[in-house]
Image (spheres, rainbow, N blue to C red):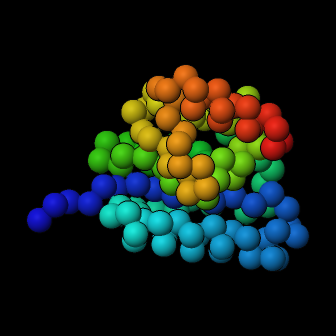
Amino acid sequence: MKQSKKIVGYCRVSTDNQKEEGTIEIQEKSLKEYVEKNGYELVKIFKDNGISGGSELENRPGLVELFSCIENNKEIEGVLIFKLDRLARDLYIQEHLIKKLEELNKKLISIKEPHLDSKDPMRKAFRQFMGIVLN
């Protein structure tokens, strides 16, 4: 029997208003549906509720816990997010986190942006361009 690929999820909402509207639950549901359809095993979902996407890593307890988890669990292949702005709204922070994942040899999977591969210069440029335009 083939073993499924293990990943962790990350969800974030930035305001109390979004918390009340259930945005984090929508993200969670989407992550669970994605892993089911794509043959992954979702080990855990980390969350930052009511925290700005412009916040540095140390100000986001869910993200700190996520990085601790993936640094200590070699079998986890990557991180699943709903979309890039849930990881970070600030382009500099976004690119820093992606680089950190690459250094750990973990892939980043976005449900809404399926082509995030940094090894392809055009995809990286497009990702960065979208980070500038959408933020």
Q: Residue furthest toward the front?
A: 122
Q: Is residue 101 above or below residue 42?
A: above
Q: Nearer the viewer, residue 52 or 132?
A: 132
Residue located 85% across and 62% down the image:
15
Residue 63, how many percent across, how many down? Answer: 61, 48
Dividing the image into 4 quarters, which one contains the C terminus? top right
Query: In the image as oriented, which residue stretches furthest toward the left?
Result: 1
Residue 49 sits in which quadrant?
A: bottom right
| Residue 113 place in picture, x, y as percent | 60, 49
Q: Is residue 72 left or right of residue 56?
A: left
Please determine whether, in this image, residue 71 is positioned above or below residue 9: above
Q: Position of residue 72 (x, y in %)?
A: 38, 42
Q: Residue at 74% across / 37% down in the picture?
A: 131
Instruction: For the N terminus, give its image quadrant.
Output: bottom left
The residue closer to the viewer here, 3 or 55, is 3
Residue 16 occupies quadrant:
bottom right
Q: Tell me if 55 is positioned left or right of 101 in this view.
A: right
Q: Residue at x 58, y 26 (%)?
A: 122
Image x and y of residue 111, in percent: 56, 57
On the question of residue 80 being in view, the answer is yes
Write the residue at 26% across / 60% down: 4
Q: Residue furthest top?
A: 121
- Asked if one can make out residue 54 in the rendered structure from this viewpoint, the answer is no
Q: Residue furthest right?
A: 17
Q: How many marks?
A: 0
Does residue 63 lie above or below 15 as drawn? above
